[in-house]
Image (tube, rainbow, N blue to C red):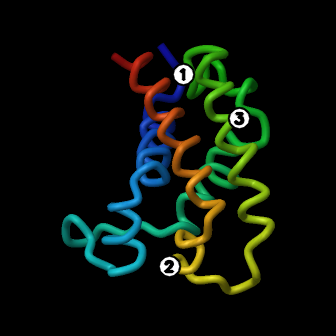
């Protein structure tokens, strides 16, 4: 059990968005949300990890709060390890279509997929 299950759900939703190129294309690029009032883009997902939940700063510090164990923390850290330099490499004002078409984005998607798998396995 974690202390902040709603925050965990938000983190997991973010990881799923980062792990799903089809979602990224439809929602971030083509602006076709799955339901009215839904909004999602790359900036929002970065904000969840780095600003709103600050899990990207130190995933291990979130064990018991939003993460169940060290395996989850390591999976999130592996994502941060590729996402952070990717973000830093983007020229200012890069749109989502350009960002997700960059070769390095594939590493972000793969790390996010692994993190989703680990967190979903623990969540049951």
**Residue drawn 54% across the image and 58% down it:** 45
Q: Going by the picture, which residue comes out furthest to the bottom?
A: 93
| Distance Cα–Cα, label 3 vs label 1 | 20 Å
The residue identified by callout 3 is 77
* Badge number at residue 13: none
Count neighbours of disc 1 (C-alpha within 10 A) and say few if under 14, some if 14 to 19, many if 20 or more. some
Q: Earlier in the sequence, mark 3 or mark 1?
A: 1
| Distance Cα–Cα, label 2 vs label 1 | 36 Å
Give the structural element (helix, strand or loop) at label 2. helix
Q: Quadrant of the C terminus?
A: top left
Give the structural element (helix, strand or loop) at label 3. helix
Whether 80 is drawn above or below 97: the answer is: above
Kindly check if marks 2 and 3 are in contact, taking CB atoms under 8 A apart as contact: no
Front residue of this view, candidates 19 and 38: 19
Q: Is residue 113 left or right of residue 35?
A: right
**Residue drawn 46% across the image and 34% down it:** 116
The residue identified by callout 1 is 3
The quadrant holding residue 89 is bottom right
| Distance Cα–Cα, label 2 vs label 3 | 25 Å
Kindly check if marks 3 and 1 are in contact, taking CB atoms under 8 A apart as contact: no
Q: Going by the picture, which residue comes out furthest to the front?
A: 103
Give the structural element (helix, strand or loop) at label 1. loop
The residue identified by callout 2 is 97
**Residue drawn 58% across the image and 68% down it:** 43
Q: Going by the picture, which residue comes out furthest to the left?
A: 35
Whether 71 is drawn above or below 52: the answer is: above
Whether 92 is drawn above or below 49: the answer is: below
Count neighbours of disc 3 (C-alpha within 10 A) and say few if under 14, some if 14 to 19, many if 20 or more. many
Front residue of this view, candidates 19 and 119: 19
Q: Is residue 103 left or right of residue 6?
A: right
Q: Mark 3, mark 1: which one is toward the viewer?
A: 3
Q: Earlier in the sequence, mark 2 or mark 3?
A: 3
């Amino acid at each position: 059990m974690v202390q902040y299950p709603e925050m965990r759900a938000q983190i997991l939703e973010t990881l799923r968005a980062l792990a799903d190129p089809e979602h990224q294309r439809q929602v971030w690029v083509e602006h076709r949300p799955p339901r009215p009032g839904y909004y999602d883009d790359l900036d929002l997902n970065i904000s969840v990890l780095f600003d709103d939940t600050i899990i990207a700063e130190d995933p291990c510090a979130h064990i018991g709060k939003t993460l169940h164990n060290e395996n989850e923390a390591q999976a999130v850290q592996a994502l941060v390890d590729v996402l952070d330099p990717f973000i830093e490499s983007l020229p200012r004002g890069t749109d989502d279509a350009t960002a997700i078409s960059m070769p390095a984005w594939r590493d972000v998607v793969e790390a996010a997929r692994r993190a989703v798998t680990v967190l979903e396995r623990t969540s049951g």
